[in-house]
Amino acid sequence: MRRHRSPRTSVQGSANVGQGIRRGLAWSTVSSIVLRLGTFSLGIFLARVFTPEQFGLYAVVLTVQAVLMTLADFGLSTDLIRSADHRRKAPTVATFALVISAVLTLAMMSVSQPLADVLGASDAGPVLAVMSLTLLIAGAGVVPYATLQCTFRQKQVFLVAVVDFVVGTAVIVVLVMDGWGVMALAVSRVAAQLAAVIVQFVLVGERPRFGWDGTIARGAVAFGVPVAGANLLSWALLGADKILVSGLAGATALGFYFLAFNVANWPMSVLGQVVRSVSLPAFSRVAGGDRDRSLAITLAPVWGVAAVAGLMLIVLAAPAIELLYGARWLAAAPLLMMLGGFGALRTVLDLATSYLLARGESGRVFWLQVAWMALLIPALVVSILGWGIHGAALAQLIVSVVLLGLYARALGRVGVDLRAGWSSFWPPLAASVPAGAAVWLVTSFSELSERAGFADVAGFAGAPLIELLLGGLVGTAVYAGLLWRWMVARIATARQLGSEDLIEPPIEPRHEGTSSTSASSSRALEGTP
């Protein structure tokens, strides 16, 4: 039986939600690939210019800002993305967001130096003070950002991200070359954030509109508290390792760890950004009922790509780091071998989080983040004290595996077909074993030949570029050969997700304006390496 189209569809101006999802996904893919290549290049530049200690200070500043950005949003952007009454809520949300971000900005400025001292990075105090201005600017952009997202206008979102990246990169490169050091990061982010918000307002064709409705405001508070809590925990989790490494092992050790962590999160940065931009509004329309298969259908192609990306980072860690960042960063290679698996699994966890949020399960998301924190913090402390930064990387991987089980339990309780989910998860995992073995044999051939008393017949011993290209080609070929038919079939199924026959009415909070059980996927910092 054909389901009735939701009134929300008219708000978004889309004649067909499935078409909107596919169009948005296509533009998100282009945006993510282009911008990730840009930030990837910028990251290489900074790693070659900064010392490991400066890179560690850079990590501290980015971590603190990312955590505070989640509070500045307060879940308000997702409230608008999911709402059937976007325009009526917008003025109140705009006022609320600006007030929250202004308070956070003033608070951050006042405690920036003491906070930097506590984190063991005293030189970062003035940088944190300047960076806090981005919180105020981000608060002003909540409404136009949500408007672009909920209408699947990913082409315009891409343009905003390009402006953000171009302005930020130009400023940071000029200032770094002029000797500004880490302060260049703060100034570049303020300039980029301001330019991006201005472009957002231009693209949505509206001026800032402020207003106040007590009923909407109470609903926003009820919505925002679990959202802010879950997002704060999420980003605190991503920053806890860096803060602990900085405090227990020093800024130089943090520099190596931060570089490996960033490289390991390439699958999450590229693939996660693509999927995240459309998964929340998409799941809110197509997910529902018992034994729901929409998550499993989406998981198959997402995990299929994330698994092979993580695999390549694991088995090609050393040549990748040496080629891109230089031999002085090779100490980060063992870390990347462990964190590569963590980065791939994060893509799955992020997709599952978006699904839970779309089903209105912010409470479950919050408690999953609490469980993550409860597991990770003691594991990090013990492992860092015992094995340094290598222990921190191992703790991240082990805890992420445990979290998969906890997420599966939560998803099963809200009606996800876990058997279908497992059928989407295990084939890429199984294909990774022979693919990884093939890469190891190819990259180890010269060393094995020399040990056997033969000359370097392969001719690429110690040549990271050749190892990277040949190993990547062989590994990807083996992986693709094993999964090709499976992947094509799963992509074909995923393309049908969101078709008119599958659309469910949107899931709204049970008591609109008084209480809500939804949460926001945190808005990641755009244009930062």
Image (cartoon, rainbow, N blue to C red):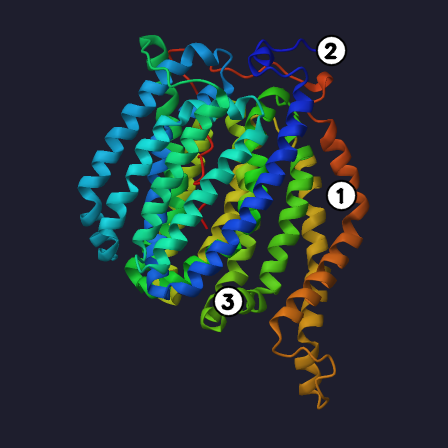
Residue farthest right in this picture? 485
In the rendered structure, the answer to whether residue 92 lies left or right of residue 130 reads right
Q: CA distance from mark 1 to mark 2?
A: 29 Å
Query: What's the residue type where badge 3 is placed?
Result: Pro
Can residue 17 be seen here? yes
Mark 1 and mark 3 lie on one chain; the one further toward the N terminus is: 3
Specify few, some or many for label 3: CA neighbours under 10 Å numbering under 14, 14-19, or 20 or more: some
Q: Quadrant of residue 312?
A: bottom right
Q: Would you place residue 219 above or below residue 491 in this image?
A: above
Mark 1 and mark 2 lie on one chain; the one further toward the N terminus is: 2
Q: Which residue is mark 3?
A: 334
**Tag 2 secondary structure:** loop
Specify few, some or many for label 2: CA neighbours under 10 Å numbering under 14, 14-19, or 20 or more: few
Q: Nearer the viewer, residue 122 or 296?
A: 122
Specify few, some or many for label 1: CA neighbours under 10 Å numbering under 14, 14-19, or 20 or more: some
**Tag 3 secondary structure:** helix
Q: Nearer the viewer, residue 307 or 209?
A: 209
Q: At 67% across and 44% down in the image, what residue appears?
A: 425
Q: Which residue is mark 1?
A: 487
Mark 3 and mark 2 lie on one chain; the one further toward the N terminus is: 2
Q: CA distance from mark 3 to mark 2?
A: 54 Å
Q: Which residue is mark 2?
A: 2
Q: Quadrant of residue 388?
A: bottom left
